[in-house]
Amino acid sequence: MFEAQSIGMGNDPASVRQRVEMLERVLERSFRIPGINYPVGLDAIAGLIPIVGDLVTAAMGAYIVWEARNLGMPKWKIWHMGANVAFDTAVGAVPLVGDAFDLLFRSNTKNLKIIRKHLDKHHPETRIIEQ
């Protein structure tokens, strides 16, 4: 059958990194706006659906924080990441203003940077050379 680590389903740091990076890409930069070539993701698109869209993307952002917690990251970093998601959700829920805000404030990208920094320091074997 399949090995869990080969498809990123394990609990090892490399699998966690793979899942978190994939989810951040889906939430923040999975599409490009034609004409201006600006990346957007599910967070900005789902935010157009009142309440439900913001709750769904908040849950997905909270999953990233949960994965960070499972990595054993310090509590202050977990709180910082949770605050990023909470702020994004609160402001993103405001009609019109929140939709524009979702295009600019990328809480999941900020949280991915925090996780990458932790993994690069504590689990350097998980680093991926980006092209």
Image (spheres, rainbow, N blue to C red):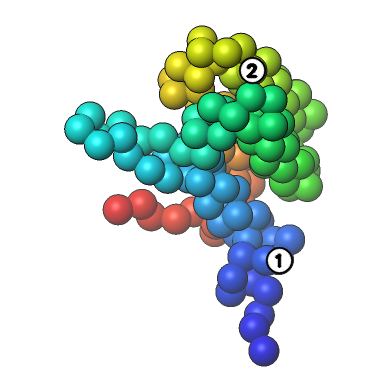
Q: Which mark is residue 10?
A: 1
User: Residue 39 appears at what percent x and percent y?
Assistant: 36, 35
Q: Position of residue 84 (x, y in %)?
A: 64, 22
Callout count: 2
Q: Quadrant of the N terminus?
A: bottom right
Q: Say whether residue 20 is left or right of residue 73.
A: left
The residue that appears at 32% across and 39% down in the rendered structure is 32
Tag 1 secondary structure: loop
Q: Is residue 60 depicted above or below 4 in this figure?
A: above
Image position of 12 with respect to 55: above or below: below
Q: Residue furthest front?
A: 49
- The quarter of the picture where residue 12 lies is bottom right
Estimate how packed mark 1 is, as few (under 14), some (14 to 19) or many (20 or more) residues with alpha carbons within 10 Å.
Answer: some
* Residue furthest left as drawn: 35
For the question of whether residue 87 can be seen, the reply is no
Q: Position of residue 68 (x, y in %)?
A: 71, 41
Front residue of this view, candidates 18 and 74: 18
| Relative depth, front residue between 75 and 108 | 108
Disc 1 or 2, which lies upstream in sequence? 1
- Is 50 drawn above or below residue 94 in the view shown? below
Residue name at image x 56 percent, y 56 percent: 18
Most extreme residue toward the bottom, as rendered?
Answer: 1
- With respect to residue 2, does 68 lie above or below? above
> As shown in the figure, which amino acid type bears the numbered disc 1?
Gly
Give the image location of residue 49, x and y in percent.
Answer: 59, 29
Please report the residue visible at 72 percent of the width from the left and 42 percent of the height from the top. Answer: 63
Looking at the picture, which amino acid does disc 2 mark? Answer: Ala
Residue density around tag 2, few if under 14, some if 14–19, many if 20 or more, within 10 Å: many
Residue 112: tell me if it is visible.
yes
Q: Name the residue beneath numbered marker 2.
A: 93
Inter-mark Cα distance, 1 to 2: 34 Å
